[in-house]
Image (cartoon, rainbow, N blue to C red):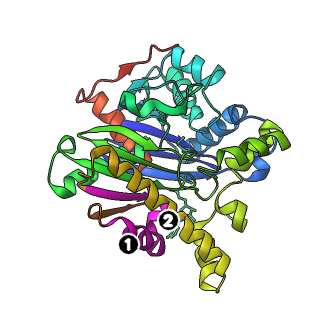
Amino acid sequence: MKILAINPGSTSTKIALYDNEREVFQQNLEHTNDDLAPFKEIADQYQMRKTAITSVLEERGIRLEELKAVVGRGGILPPVKSGAYRVNEAMVDRLRNRPLAEHASNLGGLIAYEMAESLGIPSFIYDSVAVDEFEPIARISGLADIKRKSLSHALNMRAAAIETAKRVGKPYRDLNLIVAHLGGGITVSVHHQGRMVDIVSDDEGPFSPERAGRVPCMELVKLCYKEEQGTAMKKIRGKGGLISYLNTNSALEVEKMIAQGNDEAKLVYEAMAYQIAKAIGELATVVEGKVDRVVITGGIAYSEMMTGWIQKRVEFIAPVELIPGENELRSLALGALRVLKGEETALEYDLD
Ligand SMILES: Nc1ncnc2c1ncn2[C@@H]1O[C@H](COP(=O)(O)OP(=O)(O)O)[C@@H](O)[C@H]1O
Ligand SMILES: CCCC(=O)OP(=O)(O)O
């Protein structure tokens, strides 16, 4: 059974074709600054990204009529459950016209839906960034006007948690795990007996290659009065974190700077590790310190320097498991495959 998986990121669209569990190919379609410059909003990039996908499929001679489903990374929807949702008109309306926030992943479900509809096959999203399994106590922010939201790298974090359970030799549901996803954005989650009951999100916790994370509130309010809303938002999401201190969003570049003796780069990069470790420590309290494993995943988990610094600070909490990189396309494809095989049921999206 052939399944096309689509994962739109801020500067690329990753796609993969699977034939059952076997990856037929995977390709990263880069979108340069020049490609993206004409588009005011991410939603406006829809046609450009869809055309890039269909061109690759054509070049590779993929027969679309052989596809059995298309699955996309789910976007910033109102809170949803973990697992698969079938993309329907209600979800398309929300993602296209009223997403809760601008994010490239909003395009995943939209492109999957349009491609699948024209082929008469189903489209799905899987483990959307909006997966919300918070306990009520986790929703309180500290300001009655603001409710905490569960927006995270749920797709890769849940896959890494399930992989860790396999390594430990126990069911996922029997474990307490803390998972840190270290990519362009960083989020950290705590999994209590198979549910992601709380997170430290990318605007509540560690800074990351391109996001500011938690910054002092009062200073942030002053900044917002100095800048226009769009500029202030871009400063904390897109131009924050490593970029704001070191002018690069590449952790690899930062490591080169450190190797060349750049002390400022070392201080900032180690501060990122320090903040990640603090987020892990914070989430350990959610399960009263009863943590079976701390899991570090995402592109930066390939870095021995970064994982070494984090490990030193958190291994008193639990043994640390490294699962470098992200297998988001595989997680999407295998999720859709389980639905097609009847091993899992896709939920119907019925929120406004
Ligand atoms: N071997 C490595 N060592 C350190 N950092 C790495 C390594 N490989 C990739 N990275 C960093 O990982 C980050 C991207 O992670 P990734 O999970 O692919 O993020 P995203 O999907 O959010 O773009 C970049 O900052 C990149 O420099
Ligand atoms: C909102 C959490 C998901 C996220 O930030 O994804 P990217 O880092 O891929 O933009």
What is the crowding at mark 1: few (fewer than 14 residues within 10 Å), some, or many (at least 20)?
A: few
Quadrant hosting ligand 2: top right
- Residue corresponding to mark 2: 274
The residue depicted at 47 percent of the width and 31 percent of the height is: 140
Amino acid residing under circle 2: Tyr
Q: Where is residue 165 in the image (x, y as percent from the top left)?
A: 22, 51
Lateral position of residue 3 relative to residue 186, left or right:
left
Q: Residue furthest bottom?
A: 261
**Mark 1 / mark 2, whichever is N-terminal:** 2
Lateral position of residue 67 relative to residue 91, left or right:
left
Q: Is mark 2 on a helix, strand or loop?
A: helix
Which SS type dominates the magenta stretch? helix
The label on residue 108 is: none
The residue depicted at 56 percent of the width and 53 percent of the height is: 28
Contact flag, marks 1 and 2 (Cβ < 8 Å): no
* Residue 299 within the magenta-colored segment of the rendering: yes
Give the CA distance from mark 1 to mark 2.
Answer: 10 Å
Front residue (pair 174, 339):
174
Q: Position of residue 243 (x, y in %)?
A: 69, 61
Lateral position of residue 338 relative to residue 242, left or right:
left
Relative to residue 44, is residue 268 depicted above or below?
Answer: below
Q: What stretch is highlighted in magenta?
A: 293-315
- Residue corresponding to mark 1: 312
The residue depicted at 26 percent of the width and 39 percent of the height is: 194
Front residue (pair 234, 341):
234
In the figure, residue 53 lies in which quadrant? top right
In the figure, residue 100 lies in which quadrant? top right
